[in-house]
């Protein structure tokens, strides 16, 4: 019954019989508290008080009065009116006596003055008063009850910050503790699942843009959709170099029989040259300096270089600096025991992505003006088999090779002539990147990307099939956790399958170029899954220094199947950083994410000591070869690789705060600054008028970063991390570090890898150090004014990164 109807019934009550003859219904005590049953949820104390008040007013007590002191009535005179209310029983016994004034007698009857007679109007006044008292009591009780509910209990005071966030966000927060998350993920993975997915996605040949590549892309989309992921594709039109459709590339040494290798190096210059052979070891800068120190003429020579240590593109670029005319690259059996007749494939673009659309995406082949990357070589480059290389090395004349090179043959003379002819064909291909996404429940617009190359020169089992299989199994497992285990990631996970990876991470880089402005602010990590199983006796990780702490913790949590020891115990004993960590190299697909886009990135692999997998870049990369290299542990290693990548990914999308260490870059910056300072002092001592620039600017910028990073860490420690908006602000500032270490003062076309610490080019701190070496030796590359400009721009890049860490403009350090 509603309150309004109750009031109407009471107000409309009329005597139905003369005094003394009341109906039985009027003999019962009126239970007026029953119509207010909707207040049953009141605090008990407040309800008891309200009921007591009602009973006293309506049921009456002997000689109980309610007094109204009217200080001034309508006529202006002061009056005192007293009203006494009796029960119905008293009224029945004594009759209804209404007089001009209120009094009482021995029959304990109550009368109301004529001004306050028993009329509907007066009853409404009384009931209104009662209702007001009830409302006040309700409000007091509600406030007391609410305060008690909001007061923290002992149990709540010991809850973790994750649990507090979950209470505040409800379904929008992870409902699982971290231990439950990692255990649930581990249960989803098994070696038998990897065997099946490897079988489904193995292919004899799936070069980028081929029908086999497209068929694999269609399979991936269906799998992602089967797992419940949102899917889409990213289409690009790229230009690549392939081997000649008619004819072949040729190599002829000293008028011997003509060699026509099947392998080739994409993006080589085309043409035909003849020159004297010169052995240049691995083609590193140090190797060429060693040849220079012996006054060996390298102009116009054809460099014979063994594969390994640095990328093919870097070898060719170093040779071009020495004015060589061509480069021949082979795999030495000491480094790669893969057979004498093994054909070798690769590319020589000193960069990543489509070199004919540098700095912008190749979405449409008619959209942009023609352009070329500065990383394209202007000399010929070709691979040869180990057998062909052995035949040339065994007949070389000239000086002996350096003893520290570990070889026992000649370097070559002016009479050791070789002819090299390259006829590669530039073709346009349509490629598709495939994506599946699991959206986050709190920060859906912040995402972690996991990617794997899909294409290969041949079977590409280790180079592409394993990575694709691990990507799929991770997507299936995490999706299953959402459906069955209640896992709800705070941030989104993007699973990406790239095409044209063999041509220099073309698919991945074109995607970065297409969405750079969005990705650089929203993607907080990239995990590369290419070539993750290539051996079994060592474990190597290349990553942003900000992720070192997370890597160490993950190594301690993950282990191989049926082995109790963790990866840390197996591979990280002693100094884990020296045993496990390695530099992120140019040919790694994670490199453009970090050095071009400023996204903290990670790449890892199981390998065999310091020896590279001998079948990468060949047509022999099959499952059988990988089984032999891993001692038939490839399935267990794939499972461990999925656990390692999955633990890092899940930790980054589960925790309220990104697990990034800002202080690692502080140490790296200080080390670079100290080295530059020592070299400047040396140059000023030997040539006092050459470098007047003060290093104090760079030292001050380094100090600014140190203070900003430490203050941010301190602020985080002293903050309420259950505040979701606060965590988002801190996470954005953490994400800005890698991005703000990209130099804003160089062209993405001329120097795409703009990271001043991990990139390449004269704008980097390493470039400054190398330029100081040239200034000290008086080399041809020395340019004082250019050095000063590079020094100033590098200094301000670091200072700008420090300013971004500070956050508020009024908190900037203006010491510079």
Image: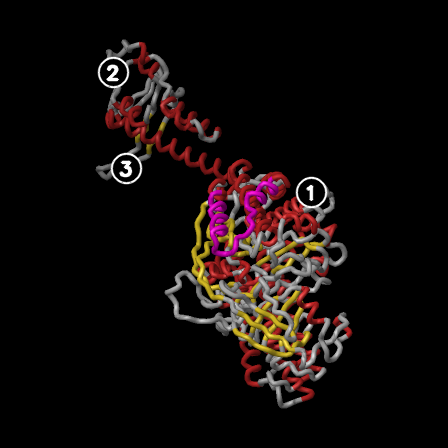
Mark 1: secondary structure? loop
Residue 328 part of the magenta segment:
no
Closest to the observer, 334 or 545: 334
Q: Earlier in the sequence, mark 1 or mark 3?
A: 3
Q: Which residue is mark 3?
A: 78
- Residue at the image position 45 percent from the left and 45 percent from the top: 230
Residue 237 visible in this rendered orientation of the protein: yes
Q: Nearer the viewer, mark 2 or mark 3?
A: 2
The correct choice, above or below, for 255 with respect to 353 in the image is: below
Q: Which residue is mark 2?
A: 15
Closest to the observer, 640 or 304: 304
Q: Which residue is mark 1?
A: 561
- Residue at the image position 70 percent from the left and 57 percent from the top: 580
Could you give the CA–CA distance between mark 1 and mark 2, rounded to whole angstroms? 91 Å
Residue 807: x and y in percent read 51, 63
The type of colouring in the image is secondary structure
In the picture, the quarter occupied by the C terminus is: bottom right
């Amino acid at each position: 019954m509603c309150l309004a109807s109750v009031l109407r019934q009471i107000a409309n009550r009329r005597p139905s019989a003369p005094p003394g003859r009341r109906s039985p219904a009027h003999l019962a005590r009126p239970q007026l508290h029953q119509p207010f049953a909707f207040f049953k949820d009141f605090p008990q104390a407040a309800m008891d008080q309200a009921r007591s008040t009602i009973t006293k007013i309506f049921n009456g007590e002997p000689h109980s009065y309610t007094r109204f002191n009217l200080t001034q009535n309508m006529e202006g005179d002061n009056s005192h009116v007293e009203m006494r209310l009796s029960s119905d029983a008293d009224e029945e016994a004594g009759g209804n006596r209404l007089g001009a004034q209120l009094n009482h007698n021995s029959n304990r009857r109550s009368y109301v003055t004529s001004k306050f007679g028993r009329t509907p109007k007066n009853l409404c006044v009384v009931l209104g008063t009662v209702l007001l008292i009830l409302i006040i009591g309700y409000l007091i009780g509600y406030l007391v009850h609410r305060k008690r509910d909001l007061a923290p209990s002992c149990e709540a005071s010991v809850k973790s910050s994750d649990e507090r966030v979950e209470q505040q966000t409800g379904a929008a927060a992870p409902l699982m503790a971290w231990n439950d998350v990692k255990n649930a993920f581990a249960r989803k993975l098994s070696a038998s699942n990897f065997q099946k997915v490897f079988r489904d996605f193995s292919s004899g040949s799936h070069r980028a843009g081929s029908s086999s590549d497209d068929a694999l892309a269609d399979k991936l989309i269906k799998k992602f959709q089967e797992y419940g992921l949102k899917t889409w594709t990213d289409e690009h039109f790229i230009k690549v170099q392939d081997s000649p459709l008619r004819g072949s590339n040729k190599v002829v040494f000293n008028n011997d029989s003509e060699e026509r290798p099947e392998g080739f190096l994409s993006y080589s210059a085309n043409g035909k040259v003849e020159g004297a052979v010169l052995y240049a070891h691995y083609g590193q800068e140090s190797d060429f300096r060693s040849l220079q120190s012996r006054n060996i003429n390298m102009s116009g020579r054809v460099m014979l270089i063994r594969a390994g240590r640095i990328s093919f593109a870097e070898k060719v670029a170093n040779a071009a600096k020495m004015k060589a005319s061509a480069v021949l690259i082979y795999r030495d059996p000491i480094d790669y025991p893969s057979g004498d007749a093994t054909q070798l494939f690769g590319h020589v673009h000193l960069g990543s992505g489509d070199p004919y659309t540098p700095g912008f995406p190749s979405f449409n082949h008619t959209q942009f003006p023609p352009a070329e990357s500065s990383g394209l070589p202007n000399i010929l480059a070709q691979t040869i088999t180990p057998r062909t290389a052995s035949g040339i090395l065994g007949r070389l004349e000239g000086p002996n090779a350096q003893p520290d090179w570990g070889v026992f043959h000649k370097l070559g003379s002016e009479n050791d002539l070789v002819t090299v002819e390259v006829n590669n064909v530039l073709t346009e291909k349509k490629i598709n990147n495939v994506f599946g996404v699991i959206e986050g429940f709190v920060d859906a617009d912040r995402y972690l990307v996991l990617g794997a190359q899909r294409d290969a020169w041949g079977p590409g089992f280790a180079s592409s099939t394993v990575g694709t299989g691990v990507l799929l199994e991770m997507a299936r497992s995490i999706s299953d956790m959402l459906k069955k285990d209640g896992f709800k990631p705070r941030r989104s996970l993007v699973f990406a399958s790239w095409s044209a990876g063999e041509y220099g991470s073309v698919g991945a880089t074109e995607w970065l170029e297409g969405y750079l402005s969005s990705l650089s602010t929203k993607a907080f990590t990239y995990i590369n899954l290419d070539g993750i199983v290539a051996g079994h006796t060592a474990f190597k990780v290349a990553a942003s220094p900000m992720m070192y702490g997370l890597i160490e913790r993950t190594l301690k949590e993950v282990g191989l199947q049926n082995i109790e020891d963790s990866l840390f115990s197996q591979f990280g004993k002693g100094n884990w950083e020296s045993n496990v960590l390695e530099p992120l190299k140019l040919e790694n697909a994670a490199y453009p994410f970090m050095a071009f886009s400023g996204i903290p990135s990670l790449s890892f692999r199981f390998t065999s000591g310091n020896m590279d997998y001998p079948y990468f870049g060949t047509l022999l990369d099959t499952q059988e070869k990988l089984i032999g290299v891993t001692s038939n542990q490839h399935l267990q290693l794939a499972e461990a690789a999925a656990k390692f990548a999955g633990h890092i990914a899940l930790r980054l999308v589960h925790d309220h705060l990104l697990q990034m260490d800002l202080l690692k870059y502080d140490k790296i910056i200080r080390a670079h600054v100290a080295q530059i300072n020592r070299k400047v002092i040396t140059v000023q001592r030997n040539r006092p008028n050459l470098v007047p620039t003060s290093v104090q600017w760079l030292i001050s910028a380094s100090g600014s970063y140190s203070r900003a990073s430490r203050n941010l860490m301190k602020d985080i420690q002293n903050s309420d991390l259950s505040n979701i908006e606060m965590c988002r602000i801190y996470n954005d500032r953490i994400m800005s570090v890698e991005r703000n270490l990209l130099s804003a003062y160089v062209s993405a076309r001329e120097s795409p890898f703009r990271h001043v610490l991990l990139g390449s080019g004269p704008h980097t701190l390493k470039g400054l150090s190398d330029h100081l070496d040239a200034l000290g030796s008086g080399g041809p590359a020395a340019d004082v004014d250019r050095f000063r400009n590079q020094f100033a721009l590098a200094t301000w890049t670091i200072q700008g990164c420090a300013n971004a860490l500070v956050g508020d403009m009024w908190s900037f350090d203006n010491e510079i």
